[in-house]
Amino acid sequence: MSPRAGRIALPMVAVVGLTFFSFIAHTFMLGASAFPGGKHIGGRYLVEEHGRTIELTAQQFWASYLHGVLMVCVFAAAGITILVLYSKGDLRDEWRDK
């Protein structure tokens, strides 16, 4: 791994981990996640999770939904970053290339 890849990839891994674990904690606190299967029906915000339906407030619903969207975006950005670093040669197997 080049120094440039280390400066980019290591903080990126920290952001991905923080986003993932905060999403898991948020889901456990609410008992469900509105992303991707939440529904707004007749003024009620409903989320089906493991065979049961949970009603959330509008604020809880949108916070959960946006947190899920943010997690997907962070994972996609991390994947693209890894692909770019790999294609530029910054991520290479130093043990194999000797």
Image (cartoon, grey):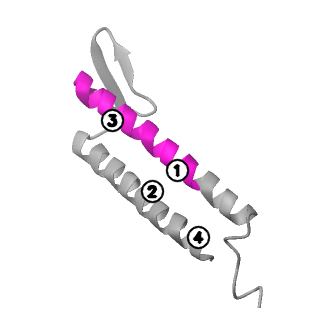
The numbered mark, 2 or 3, whose residue comes first in the sequence reads: 2
- Give the dominant element type of the magenta stretch: helix, strand or loop: helix
**Which quarter of the figure is the N terminus placed in?**
bottom right
Label 2 sits on residue: 16
Q: Secondary structure at mark 1?
A: helix
Q: Which residues are magenta?
A: 52-78
Crowd class of label 3 (few under 14; some 14 to 19; many from 20; radius 10 Å): many
The three-letter amino acid code for the residue at tag 2 is Val
- Whole-angstrom CA distance, mark 4 to mark 3, is 34 Å
Residue in front for this viewpoint, 24 or 75: 75
Q: Which of labels 2 and 3 is toward the front? A: 2
Q: Is residue 67 left or right of residue 8?
A: left
Label 1 sits on residue: 75
Q: Secondary structure at mark 4?
A: helix
Residue placed furthest toward the top = 42
At 75% across and 62% down in the image, what residue appears?
87
Where is residue 42? Give x, y as percent: 31, 8
Q: Can residue 70 be found in the magenta stretch?
A: yes
Q: Which of labels 3 and 1 is toward the front? A: 1
Where is residue 14? Give x, y as percent: 41, 63
- Give the quadrant of residue 3: bottom right
Crowd class of label 2 (few under 14; some 14 to 19; many from 20; radius 10 Å): some
- Whole-angstrom CA distance, mark 3 to mark 1, is 17 Å
Label 3 sits on residue: 64
The numbered mark, 1 or 4, whose residue comes first in the sequence reads: 4
Up-down relation of residue 10 to residue 81 (above or below):
below
The three-letter amino acid code for the residue at tag 4 is Arg
Crowd class of label 4 (few under 14; some 14 to 19; many from 20; radius 10 Å): few
The numbered mark, 2 or 1, whose residue comes first in the sequence reads: 2
At 56% across and 49% down in the image, what residue appears?
77
Q: Secondary structure at mark 3?
A: helix
Q: Which of labels 1 and 4 is toward the front? A: 4
